[in-house]
Amino acid sequence: MRNVNGKFGKFGGSYVPEMLVEPLKELEKQFLKYYKDEEFQKELAYYQKEYIGRKNPLYYAKNLTEYINGAKIYLKREDLNFTGAHKINNTIGQVLLAKRMGKKKIIAETGAGQHGVATATVCALFNMGCKIFMGEKDIKRQELNVFKMRLLGAEVIPATGGEKTLKDAVDEALMEYAKTYEDTFYLLGSVVGPHPYPLMVREFQSIIGKEAKEQILEKESKLPDYLIACVGGGSNAMGLFSEFIENKSVKMIGVEPAGLGLETGFHAATLTTGKVGIIHGFKCYNIQDENGDPLPVCSIAAGLDYPGVGPEHSYFKDTERVSYETATDDEAINAFKKLSELEGIIPAIESSHAIAYTMKFAKNLNKDKIVIINLSGRGDKDLYRMKEQLML
Ligand SMILES: *Cc1c(COP(=O)(O)O)cnc(C)c1O
């Protein structure tokens, strides 16, 4: 396993209040112990298959390929997972670890509610107490996800500080964790946060790349030329990329949300425009003001709307192992429509950023080149918003 010490070059690490140092050390120790335990891996594989519904297809998108008229395009169908996105890969892994550690309760933070729902789902499954911290503003904006979480038995706690959004939910969840870690597990939703989260979440998401590699070798008898995924915190991208890092011939592209356009300042393109700093307990590129405080970010995709990004992505930017590009709101909306029309697959607006970039990029590639796009989620949650945008 790479980066067992939580360092990704100069990025990552753990910059947390004193009272969180011990609980995070314990978490690191238990993760490293159980992750190599055969029984744990067996149980994880069982739930990946029987509950999430893995393995999901690596689908040859013939119509999209013909439309783009360049490289051959495959879609890794994370949208077909139970609950409709890749997030459940991680919440299943972490809840199994929490159980082994003897924890009785789970806490998590959520912005748009996707991670909150994936967390509440596994808490229902394993009969764990569940508290989800969510900004008061986000609670109003995401009524349906809040209802889902409550229906699943979770307590949704409004964060009332600051801007009343994700950042404030993280702050309040961390405070609660510091008080209750004896019997409580903090379930983080992306490859961000202090060590060991970026490492742990990457490992639980790496099932995406493991399957994709096997599937493409079976279908094409060779490795892909490009992997393309959208990047918010970076977990679906890292889940796909991780398995191919040593395969130097495989190029990787992370697509960030350019919002209304990079030049407007209304975007969340952290790696493309950010500076190195510390946010939420780890070092990474982030969008901050002169005082190092996170600035508001903006994207039509709530799941990509985060002012930081995973430390390993920050490292891969500097070492140029991965290149980071962008797609605007408008380009993503257009890709959302195109994939629906061409393939009958309605993608999440987050995933639509990866499709949008591929539509720009893959037309200039030879027909023998192979591209795998990570289709991180389905678009059901975005239908109301897209109906307003597309006026169909
Ligand atoms: C949350 C989410 C993302 C962004 O998170 P990452 O950690 O960057 O993967 C992307 N796609 C979907 C469908 C999501 O729900």
Image (cartoon, rainbow, N blue to C red):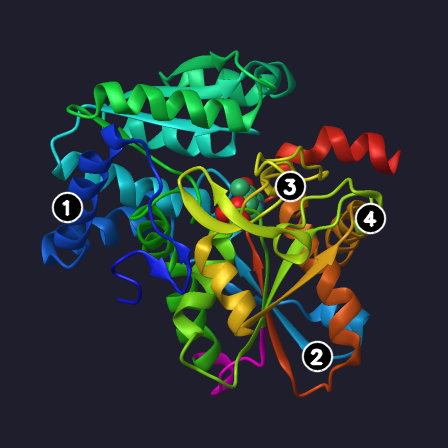
What residue does disc 4 label? 261
Q: Which residue is mark 3?
A: 379
> What is the magenta range?
218-226
Q: Mark 1 sits on what residue?
A: 30
Q: Is residue 346 left or right of residue 360?
A: left
Q: How far is the residue under mark 4 from the one under mark 3?
A: 23 Å
Residues at circles 4 and 3 in contact by the CB criterion of under 8 Å: no
Asked if the residues shown at circle 3 and circle 1 are in contact, with their CB atoms under 8 angstroms apart, the answer is no
Viewer-nearest of discs 2 and 1: 1
Three-letter amino acid code at disc 2? Ala
C-alpha gap between disc 3 and disc 1 = 36 Å
How far separated are the C-alphas under marks 1 and 4? 43 Å
Residue of label 2? 71
Residue 310 horizontal/vertical position (percent): 47, 52
At label 3, counting other C-alpha atoms closer than 10 Å, the crowd grade (few under 14, some 14-19, many 20 or more) is many
Marks 2 and 3 sit apart, C-alpha to C-alpha, by 25 Å
Q: Residue furthest front?
A: 291
Q: Is residue 161 magenta?
A: no
The spot of residue 389 in percent (x, y) is 84, 35
Image point (38%, 23%), residue name: 173
Q: Is residue 27 visible?
A: yes
Q: Is residue 141 above or below residue 228?
A: above
